[in-house]
Amino acid sequence: MTKPQGIRTENLSLWYGQFQALLDVSLEIHHGRVTGLIGPSGCGKTTLLRCFNRINERIDGVRTAGHVHILGEDIYAPGVDLVELRKRVGMVFQRPNPLPLSVRENVLFGLRIHFRRGELRKDELAHAVEASLKEVGLWEALKDKLGHRATSLSLEQQQKLCIARLLPLRPEVLLMDEPCSALDPAATQRVEQLIRELRDRYTILIVTHNMAQARRISDECIFMLLGKLIEHRRTEDLFISPKDERTANYVEGRFG
Amino acid sequence: MDDPGDNTRLVGRSPARERLHRATELVIETVIRVCGVSAVIFVFGIFYFVFREAAPLLFGGLDLGQLLTSSAWYPDSSNPRYGAFALIAGTLSVTLLAMLIAVPLGLGAAVFVSEFCTGRTKEILKIVIELLAAIPSVVWGFIGLVILNPVIIDLFDTPVGLNILNGAILLALMSVPIMVSIGEDALKAVPDAYREAAEAMGATRWQVTWRVLLPAARNGLLAAVLLGVGRAVGETMAVLMATGHSVNVPDSPLDSVRTITATIAAELGETAQGSNHYRVLFVLGSLLFLITFLVNLTADLVIRGVKKR
Ligand SMILES: Nc1ncnc2c1ncn2[C@@H]1O[C@H](COP(=O)(O)OP(=O)(O)O)[C@@H](O)[C@H]1O
Ligand SMILES: [Mg+2]
């Protein structure tokens, strides 16, 4: 392997109790690109995304089969360190969910939980806050409000903060579950811009409901239907000349 | 509400039904208002009554300085002296030690029940803790007398086991249930999205609890603690039986003391109504009122201060 690997799954299946939400999903997601995940509501996009940091396991009765390799490691192998995994694989949720702490502590949360107090120098922390907020374009707006509660920010700022708080840990993969669905069009545009800027350094997998958005920001696109992966190609190809009829129907808006 | 049938029924109600509807509404509203107002009236009524009994002495010759600073409590002597400092110290020391035990225990149990238990274990634990709340305080006093007393004598090699420690342990156990149930409610009210967000960043459950849940549920947990304090300050029977009943400014948790509540309970029955002794007990009652009022007021102010930020 010369290039850093992104995410690779082999026959990934997942059950919520008796209900099978993912059926033999095998895919390969490349590092340094934005991959969009599209499909009608309930097709398993969120579920698939949540397999990649194993956060699905919070739910009772979830069972997984198959393999998921992230950056060359089998994350479902016994003995995998979830803490380390989640440090390397960051997640942005559909509803902005900043912690009920100050802006500053939200950005530093990752550092605080992954390092002991003695390992963190004050100037490093201050630098991490500034760098992360600058990266998501919040620094100018929030530099005098670092002590304010993050939950009192606007939704756009909250969502950007949720992206910013992943950055100090230098994750390799960013998982985003409809990150703009709670935002207005202008805010959506700015968050999309941000995602484009982050593209090169991360493996980004973004779920979206919105096909226009998928076309705007993704390099590759995966179409899912009823828990199955139907088609995975370069975004332009998937939208312009889909191979599968179901993909064609979906991207042309005939259902969904 | 999309159902048009619903709308026509709402609009087209007959005048008679409309009047009935209004009348019921009025009755319900009045009942609720009376309930609310009467709660306030009762509180003021009780305070008025206590204060009325205390007032003649309070404004007629009681040396307040002596009451608050002297430990000479000789209400029955031919030369009566009313120094309640030892009683106040007794109440404060027992309450303080009780809280030192109860706060970690109660909040710890609340966190455990709410965050680390599921299914049956959780149900059973909650039932047991609620049972704890149902034990009458006389029974707690009895436990203090016959169980804790010898244990404390053995463990600490003291002549008497009826002391601050004994009373504090009982009060702690008595205030734990309310702390657990209010504390658990407070933790339960923390949106799961916060837990999920923290876990997705790699936080362990302890880190989630410590760094996210406790700050997020701060107000509710504070309320839990203060309700526990209120329970402890006002408790009478158990401390009467378990703290040794000796008027004494303590200098160790193994000293016997007497609390304000125990003094009132023990002496009120023996005083002649209207006597100075009788009245000074009501002065103590007012003092107790004042203490709990201040505790609640502080709680309120703290919570409000927290909210504003
Ligand atoms: N916690 C859960 N328990 C049971 N079924 C679930 C749960 N979460 C999702 N599902 C089901 O799994 C399927 C996929 O859901 P999801 O991944 O949320 O879809 P999407 O994100 O594509 O809208 C849906 O049919 C949904 O009802
Ligand atoms: Mg979804």
Image: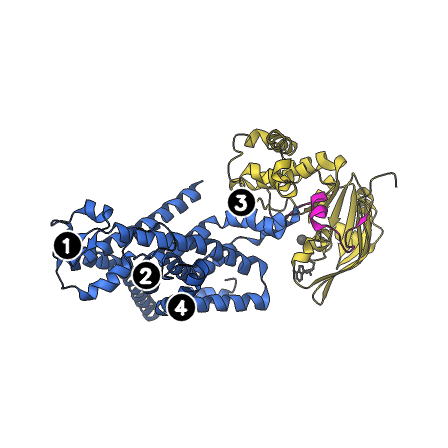
Chain colours: A yellow, B blue
Secondary element under disc 3, as helix, strand or loop, is loop
Residue position marked by numbered label 4 in the rendering: B143
In this view of the protein, which residue sits in the foreground, B83 or A165? B83
* Amino acid at circle 1: Pro
Q: Nearer the viewer, mark 3 or mark 4?
A: 4
Q: Nearer the viewer, residue A84 or A46?
A: A84
- How far, Cα to Cα, is label 3 from label 2? 47 Å
Q: Residue at 78%, 38% (x, y): give it.
A: A32
Question: What range is drawn magenta here?
Answer: A73-95
Q: The disc numbered 3 marks a residue on which chain?
A: A
Instruction: Give residue B288's position: percent from left, percent from top.
Output: 27, 54
Of helix, strand and loop, which one carries label 1? loop
What secondary structure is marked by label 2? loop
Q: Amino acid at mark 4?
A: Ile
> Looking at the image, which is closer to me, A141 or B58?
B58
Is A93 one of the magenta-colored residues? yes
Marker disc for residue B80: 1
Q: Earlier in the sequence, mark 2 or mark 4?
A: 4
Question: Which residue lies under the disc numbered 2?
Answer: B244
Tell me how far mark 2 sits from mark 4, CA to CA: 14 Å
**Letter of the chain that mark 4 sits on in the rendering:** B
User: At which x and y percent is residue B136?
Assistant: 37, 69
The subunit carrying tag 2 is B
State the mark number for residue B189: none
Judging by the rendered image, the residue that carries numbered circle 3 is A100
Alpha carbon separation for disc pair 1 and 3: 58 Å
Q: Position of residue B98 (x, y in %)?
A: 40, 55
The residue most toward the right is: A1
Q: Residues within 10 Å of mark 3 (few under 14, many from 20)?
A: many
Query: Please, what secondary structure does the residue beneath circle 4 have?
Result: helix
Q: Could you tell me if residue B139 is visible in this image?
A: yes
